[in-house]
């Protein structure tokens, strides 16, 4: 077996010859105290400890979109990915799942990501290369039209051996009580409606414009607003329908019998509440009913006010 010593000096890196070696040590003539390390020549394939890093796109769409990074389990590389995501034009949140791969990743080997139920995955197949020195970090895009629980599995293309897997649930990306506590005492300034009336009040020597304000108490909800809100309701929507919106279980059963699409079912549930309340089915009224629901739902309703 032949050894060389990688010696990094101010003038650059060089490979120096060794004097002797044993099973545990390498001996060479020391020329300086700059960084050194033994190098072994080998024709074996290069393997890496791998990590899978997940980020979800944060937007108002009811669909799900993720970025999946397959990387070497290297702290510096993972920080580079975080910076890349942070400077993206889109807004992302990191999904906490065990990142470490069950098998070593082989340099130059092909892998593919599989989803259950099936999702749109781009690219369908990729060749793993250590991209730690690349400025642009490659990723896989995963898109699901309906926000449902699903499983992601990374497999070797040639053998279908599982390298990594995780189950993603709605609770992984819905903001929890901790976010809600930080909002206590804080209210987002309400947007002024375009339709607000302006009345001129005469004051001696001055003319003052008095601008009317809309607090949402008279604003009725549109179908577009209801479908947006339906996409934000989680699996607990039936409980919300009964406990918060005071609908009958017969209403829910009738909707579920006729509709397979979960988002459309939630939309029809909200329409049923609107039909029952008629002129009282305002944005403010629905906001009051859903006070104890998720922060994401409250944010959407506040945007309607």
Image (spheres, helix red, strand yellow):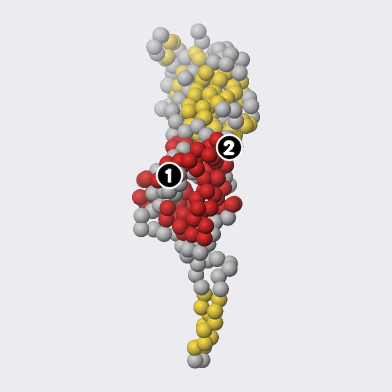
Which residue does the image show at 52% across and 87% down from the upper left?
202
Q: Position of residue 258 (x, y in %)?
A: 58, 37
Badge 1 marks a residue whose secondary structure is helix
Distance from the alpha carbon under mark 2 to that under mark 1 = 19 Å
**Location of mark 1 (residue):** 242
Q: Is residue 108 left or right of residue 78?
A: right
Give the residue drawn at x 52%, y 57%.
278
Please name whichever residue, 21 or 79, is drawn nearer the observer in this view of the structure. 79
Residue 95 at what x, y percent from top left? Answer: 47, 36
In the image, residue 166 sits, relative to residue 278, either above or below, namely above
Relative to 201, residue 39 above or below: above
| Disc 2, SS | helix
N-terminal of the pair, mark 2 or mark 1, is 1
* Residue under numbered circle 2: 258
Camera-side residue: 26 or 210?
210
Q: Residue at x 53, y 27 (%)?
A: 152
Residue 109 location, quadrant: top right
Which residue is more in the foreground, 236 or 118?
A: 236
Residue 96: which disc? none
- State the image coordinates of residue 136 (x, y, percent, origin top left): 59, 37
């Amino acid at each position: 077996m032949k050894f060389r010593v990688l010696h990094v000096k101010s003038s650059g890196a060089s490979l120096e010859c060794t004097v002797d070696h044993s099973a545990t040590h390498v001996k060479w003539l020391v020329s300086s105290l700059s960084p050194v390390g033994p190098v072994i020549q080998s024709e074996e394939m290069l393997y890496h400890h791998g990590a899978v890093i997940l980020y979800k796109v944060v937007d108002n769409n009811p669909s799900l979109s993720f970025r999946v990074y397959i990387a070497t389990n290297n702290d510096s590389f993972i920080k580079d990915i975080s910076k890349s995501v942070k400077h993206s034009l889109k807004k992302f949140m990191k999904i906490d799942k065990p990142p470490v791969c069950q098998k070593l990743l082989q340099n130059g080997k092909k892998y593919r990501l599989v989803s259950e139920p099936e999702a749109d995955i781009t690219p369908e197949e990729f060749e793993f290369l250590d991209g730690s020195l690349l400025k642009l970090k490659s990723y896989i895009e995963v898109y699901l039209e309906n926000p449902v629980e699903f499983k992601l599995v990374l497999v070797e293309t040639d053998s279908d051996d599982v390298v990594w897997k995780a189950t993603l649930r709605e609770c992984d990306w819905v903001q929890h009580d901790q976010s809600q506590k930080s909002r206590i005492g804080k209210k987002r300034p309400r947007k002024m409606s375009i339709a607000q009336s302006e009345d001129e009040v005469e004051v001696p020597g001055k003319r003052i414009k008095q601008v009317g304000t809309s607090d949402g108490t008279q604003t009725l909800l549109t179908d577009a607003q209801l479908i947006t809100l339906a996409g934000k309701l989680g699996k607990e929507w039936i409980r919300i329908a009964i406990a918060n919106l005071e609908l009958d279980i017969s209403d829910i059963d009738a909707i579920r019998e006729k509709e397979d699409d979960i988002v459309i079912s939630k939309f029809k549930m909200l329409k049923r509440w609107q039909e029952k309340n008629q002129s009282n089915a305002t944005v403010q009224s629905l906001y009051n009913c859903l006070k104890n629901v998720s922060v994401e739902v409250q944010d959407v309703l506040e945007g309607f006010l």
